[in-house]
Structures are given as C-alpha cells and as structure tokens.
Amino acid sequence: MKHYEIAVIPGDGIGKEVVPAALDVLDAIAEVHGGISFKYTNFPWSCDYFEQHGKMMPDNGLETLQNFEAIFLGAVGDPQRVPDHVSLWGLLIKIRREFEQVINIRPAKYFRGLDTPLKGPNDFDLLVVRENSEGEYSEIGGRIHRGDDEIAIQNAVFTRKGTERAIRYAFELAQKRRGHVTSATKSNGIVYSMPFWDQVFKDVSQDYPGVQTTSVHIDALSAFFVSKPHVFDVVVASNLFGDILTDIGAVIMGSIGVAPAANINLNGKYPSMFEPVHGSAPDIAGQGIANPIGQIWTAKMMLDHLGHQEIGQHLLKVVEDVTQSGVKTTDIGGTGTTKQVTHEIICRLKR
C-alpha cells in the first residue's frame, strides 16, 4: 500500500466547497483501485485567516508544508475584504516562489459532454507549459515621483536557466505525447527577452531531433487557440503569455470551471502544488452550485504527478462519462449541484 500525506488548503469562496468534493472522489478511486491511500491535513489559511491574524498564513507556514508529498489548493481571494495583491502574494504566489514551483502545467481538451463555443473543435487536446518563476511577473521594478511625473517600471527577467528548464520540460512531455512543441514568442515587438527566448528554444530543440517545433507570435497564437486548437500538442510559454493562453484554453473547453493546473517543483526539495484555474468565485460561493470538475481534474493531475497515470486516466474518463450523461452544474448547461455531480462521479467509479 502506497500512502500519501497531502496538505489541503481549501482557501476562499468556492474552494471550501469543491475541495471536499474532490477529496471524496480521490478516496473513492483509491478504494476502487487499491494500493494507494491518502491522509489529508487541512489548513485554514485564507482571507478569513487574514482578517483574524493580519497575514494569509502563519510565519512558519512554509516550514509546515515542506514535508508533505503534495499540496492540494482550492482557491485564494476575496477582493471585497482583502486586496488581491495581498491575498495572492501572501499565500498562492508565496508558495509557488518559495517552493521553487518553476513550472505551471494546464491542459485543455475537447471534453465530452461540454458545449464548447468553438464551431469545429476537432477533438483538440493540448497542454500548456508555463514558466512559473520569473519573466514578466518578476518582482523587480518600482515607482518614483507623484502626480504628472509619476513613473512605474516593471522589469521582465528571463534567465537562461529558467527559460531552458521550462522549454526542456515541454520537450520531455511532447516525447510522451504527439511529438510537437509550439513556442509562444513576440520577438517582432519585444526586442530583448523574446529573441533570447527564441534562441534558447532553438538550442534546446537540438537535443530532441524527433520532436517537431513551431514558433508563433503570441497574438497569432491566441487567435489560433480559437480557430484551430486541434493543431497543437505541447505549447511552451513565458509566465505572462502562458497565463493568457491557458485562460483561452479554459474558455474553449466550455467553462473555466473545469480547468485544472499544476505547479511543479523539479528538484525534489519541496512539494508541488495542484489548484484549479477558476479562482474563488465569490459571486456564487455558498450556493452549492460550484462546478467541482476543475478541482477533480486537478486531483487527476496530482495522481499523474505521484506516478499513477492509469488511475488518473480512469478518473478523467469517468468525469467525462458523467458530463456526457447530462449530470452537470449550471455553468455548463446543467441543473445539478456540486454534491449531485460529485455523487454521480463517485457512484460511477464504484460500479
């Protein structure tokens, strides 16, 4: 029996609803397949915690999380109470940066049972690898002066080490998939960082002669995600470009409520963290109608990361079977509640 210690942070808003649902599903599939089990330790770190303690997590929070095998996160944010830059940088981004989760992975595929807004989806199945530690989201910059003379400077930082490891990770994934990597660039407009990105992409590609490559400017690539997503296999992008592309990927699937993500630590020093894309959705929190699929698909990505790809594939197939049968939440055209959809997934897993 392989046993996993998982740190659970439901966080804010609908995270408190979809995380328990996903854990129930994880326990169900562990029971069905046997050989694995999970122990969950819950942490109440959130905007509620901030209002009580003046911080999003305790000072020793990272030290507490360090010994777990994975972190399962729901959502962070409640801008009516805590500014987003405070909540995100105090918890989500703090964990990403301090735990060296340098790669972010977000899949997008034609999902059976979902009504995609695309006219001809052609069974697209792509994976975006996003550099997750530097680039346009670096913390270097500042503001000076006030009034009409005020200046804000934000520096984008691209290191060869950070750029190469993201690109190389994409090539490694492509070798296990359909053998094609697309690089998101903008070297016709961003004069230093993007030609550098292109050069590193070219250098790394020499080590993977069996993988086909394409380099596409981000504006055109964003359009192609809508017009012909089926042509893409693995897409590698900088921090900002990857962020934009993966939201498009979520929308073309039919709802951001189904989109999962993984923040991967490569050196083994710290745990990786798994979170859905949808955020805390305070407008529907507490109503019992949140879509649990994004969090459940995120659990599937955690299973993959822990080495249980076959179990993960089984889980995703069952989720698609459920949506195709019409048991869906309102955001994707159904009438089901969070609990009803979760219950149906668990029932089908146990049949």
Image (cartoon, rainbow, N blue to C red):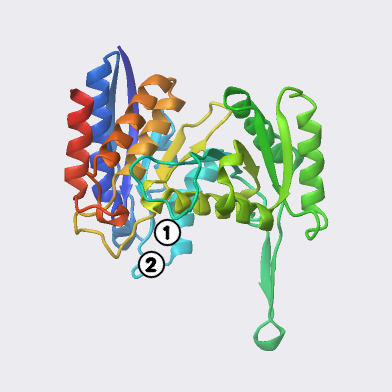
- Mark closer to the observer (2, 1): 2
Relative to 58, residue 264 above or below = above
The answer to whether marks 2 and 1 mark residues whose Cβ atoms lie closer than 8 Å is yes
- The residue under the point 82% across, 41% down is 199
Could you say which is closer to the camera, residue 274 or residue 337?
337
User: Of the residues under marks 2 and 1, which one precedes in the sequence?
Assistant: 2
The number of discs equals 2
The answer to whether residue 160 is left or right of residue 170 is right
SS assignment at label 1: helix
The percent coordinates of residue 57 (x first, y second) are 38, 50
The answer to whether residue 98 is left or right of residue 330 is right
| Residue 60 shows in the view | no
Number of residues whose C-alpha sits closer than 10 Å to that of mark 1, classed few (under 14), some (14–19) or many (20 or more): many
Q: Quadrant of the C terminus?
A: top left
Q: Which mark is residue 232?
A: none
The percent coordinates of residue 92 (x first, y second) are 45, 49
Relative to 185, residue 101 above or below = above
Say what amino acid the circle numbered 1 marks: Ser
Question: Could you say which quadrant of the image residue 32 lies in?
Answer: top left
Could you say which is closer to the camera, residue 274 or residue 174?
174
SS assignment at label 2: loop
The percent coordinates of residue 110 (x first, y second) are 44, 41
Say what amino acid the circle numbered 2 marks: Pro
Give the CA separation, mark 2 to mark 1.
8 Å
Could you say which is closer to the camera, residue 66 or residue 77?
77
Number of residues whose C-alpha sits closer than 10 Å to that of mark 2, classed few (under 14), some (14–19) or many (20 or more): some
Residue under label 1, please give it.
Answer: 87
Q: Quadrant of the N terminus?
A: top left
Residue under label 2, please give it.
Answer: 79
Report the residue that reaches farthest toward the bottom.
148
- The residue under the point 19% across, 50% down is 336
The percent coordinates of residue 211 (x first, y second) are 70, 27
